[in-house]
Image (cartoon, rainbow, N blue to C red):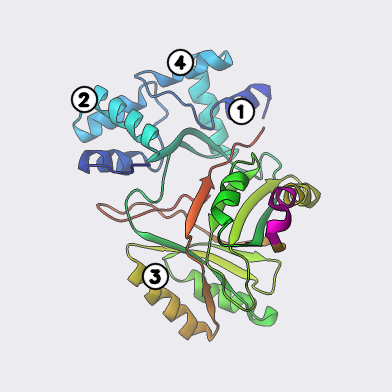
Amino acid sequence: MDQIDRDIINAFQGNFPITEHPFAVAGNAVGLDEDDLINRIESMLADNTLTRFGPLYNADTMGGAVTLCGMAVPEDDFDRIADIVNSFEEVAHNYERTHHLNMWFVVGAETREQIDTVLRSIEEKTGLTVRDMPKKSEFFVGLILEA
Amino acid sequence: MQLTIDNTDKQIILATQAGLELSPDPYNKVAKQLGLSTDDVLRRMENMLKSGVIRRIGVVPNHYALGYRSNGMTVWDVSDDQVSTLGEKIGNLPFVSHCYERPRHLPDWTYNLFAMVHAKTREGVEQQADEIKTILGDNCRADEILYSTRILKKTGLRFATSSSQNSNQD
């Protein structure tokens, strides 16, 4: 990653133009022509400097339900429990964290009822209590990182 | 904030949720794919951006590649009648990526305000947490930082074919 890549990242974590030839317009801002900007973004996606390029949609738009769950998992049984939790396709993210509640995962489904079913099933299969923490209000989502 | 969309908007969302094509005219490509005019696609995407259906358009960097190796889920116990005001303030901090009010699980989980923060080191995360603590002041009764030590699963939730949902809790 060189300075031009950094400039691209710092300039376009948002603000990518909505216009017929957006790369030409965006390229102007960082001193690149259309093709160079496209190639730069392409290489940064290929080497995993970028995880995606495009619009980021608000999850609330299409309905559906999401929740965050915490679970206290015995250390010596952690991997087995992780496999059980991860086996549900409704589980999108799962992180080990430094706390008594040491497993935190996000569950998404079309309806809240489906989420309830998944959580009950996780509890049955693991024998552990799932702490269900759906958001009550959202204050902010989004982050601009400095490259 | 109005998040109403019609069926054509939904088609545009489905066509672009995985990303925009890296070609000189990516919106024309979307229009062509959906049988719409380019002007219609541009106008609809402008509107979705204005209304907040689209949070933003651009590049999404990999935190790790930029050296942001430490993320902390900071959790706070603040009084329920203050949580909205305080949540807005915390959400406005530049290093906070998500900020939510969530239900407590008493007696052992007293926290109702969650703010995810990102820094290059744990010391950086701690400084950010201190900044939050200063803003919360006496309204904060207890707090903790939960660091992630392992990613056990990471797949994006996406909108399904017609009417379901997604999550962009990156």
> How far apart are labels 4 and 1 at the CA level?
16 Å
For the C terminus of chain A, the image quarter is top right
Q: Residue B37 shows which numbered tag? A: 2
- Residue A24 lies, with reference to residue B79, above or below; the image says above
**Disc 2 on helix, strand or loop?**
loop
x, y percent for residue B7: 21, 43
**Which amino acid, mark 4?**
Val
The residue closer to the viewer here, B56 or A87, is: B56
The answer to whether residue B146 is visible is: no
Mark 4 or mark 3: whose residue is earlier in sequence: 4
**Which amino acid, mark 1?**
Asn
Chain name for mark 1:
A
**Disc 3 on helix, strand or loop?**
helix
Q: Which residue is mark 3?
A: A115
Residue depicted at 77% across the width and 52% down the height: B126
Chain name for mark 2:
B
- Please report contact status of discs 4 and 3: CB closer than 8 Å, yes or no: no
Q: Magenta residues?
A: B132-140
> How far apart are labels 2 and 3 at the CA level?
39 Å
Mark 1 or mark 3: whose residue is earlier in sequence: 1
- Residue B90 lies, with reference to residue B74, above or below; the image says above
Q: Which image quadrant for residue B19?
A: top left
Q: Residue A10 shows which numbered tag? A: 1
The residue closer to the viewer here, A70 or B20, is: A70
Residue count near mark 1 (Cα–Cα under 10 Å), binned few <14, some 14–19, many ≥20: some
- Please report contact status of discs 4 and 1: CB closer than 8 Å, yes or no: no
Q: Residue A25 shows which numbered tag? A: 4
- Residue A45 lies, with reference to residue A16, above or below; the image says below
- Please report contact status of discs 2 and 4: CB closer than 8 Å, yes or no: no
- Please report contact status of discs 2 and 3: CB closer than 8 Å, yes or no: no
Chain name for mark 4:
A
The answer to whether residue A75 is visible is: yes
